[in-house]
């Protein structure tokens, strides 16, 4: 699979379409999900061109992985989610229902989140 430069998160990174930015550094951009599934629902994306978690974990440089994971923790902390709790999630591929082919982690929080996986 080849990275598609026209995916929606690539367009957000190029500022061709807007986002509600939460945090940015040299490695990541984080913004509110347009269709939130919980009170707080933030997406964290790497600035590098990685299709999915499989691609990122295999091909990203150690400093990109470190910068990304540090940023996820920092964003959750900045959102005051550490004490109340939060969930992080990455969908990879078809069975997980990945919609956007640019690796991203969801941060959910701000309320009780229910079971880890829906039984319906
Ligand atoms: P996934 O199913 O893990 O690929 O998640 C993709 C997420 O991107 C969904 O939760 C969408 O609501 C979200 N999304 C799609 N387009 C946008 C956008 N333009 N701005 C913010 N979030 C978006």
Image (cartoon, rainbow, N blue to C red):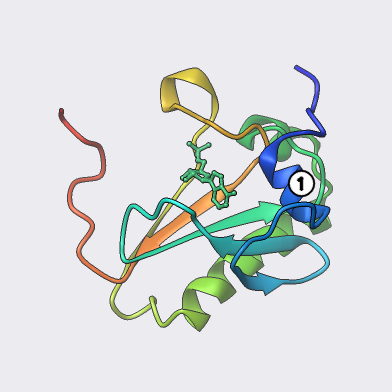
Query: Which quarter of the image is occupied by the C terminus?
Result: top left
Q: Which of the 4 image quarters holds residue 60?
A: top right
Residue placed most toward the observer, 38 or 93: 38
| Residue 51, horizontal then vertical, whole percent | 70, 32
Q: Residue at x 83, y 53 (%)?
A: 14
In the image: residue 60, left or right of residue 110: right
Q: Residue 84 in the image: x percent, y percent?
A: 28, 77
Residue found 48% across the figure and 54% down from its top? 34
Image quadrant holding the N terminus, namely top right
Q: Which residue is mark 1?
A: 11
User: Residue at 78% of width from left, 54% of height from top?
Assistant: 13
Q: Is residue 40 left or right of residue 4?
A: left
Count of labels in the image: 1
Front position in the image: 50 or 42: 42
For the residue labelled by badge 1, is the local secondary structure a helix, a strand or a loop? Answer: helix
Q: 49 above or below 31? A: above
- Horizontal arrangement in the rendering, residue 14 relative to residue 38 (left or right): right
């Amino acid at each position: 699979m080849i990275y598609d430069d026209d995916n929606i998160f690539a367009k957000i990174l190029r500022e061709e379409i807007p986002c509600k930015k939460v945090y940015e550094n040299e490695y990541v951009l984080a913004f509110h999900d347009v269709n939130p599934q919980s009170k707080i629902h933030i997406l964290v994306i790497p600035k590098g061109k990685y299709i999915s978690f499989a691609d990122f974990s295999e091909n990203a440089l150690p400093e990109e992985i470190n910068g990304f994971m540090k940023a996820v923790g920092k964003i959750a902390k900045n959102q005051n989610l550490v004490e109340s709790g939060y969930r992080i999630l990455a969908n990879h591929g078809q069975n997980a229902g990945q919609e956007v082919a640019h690796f991203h982690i969801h941060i959910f929080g701000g309320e009780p989140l229910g079971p880890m996986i829906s039984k319906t």
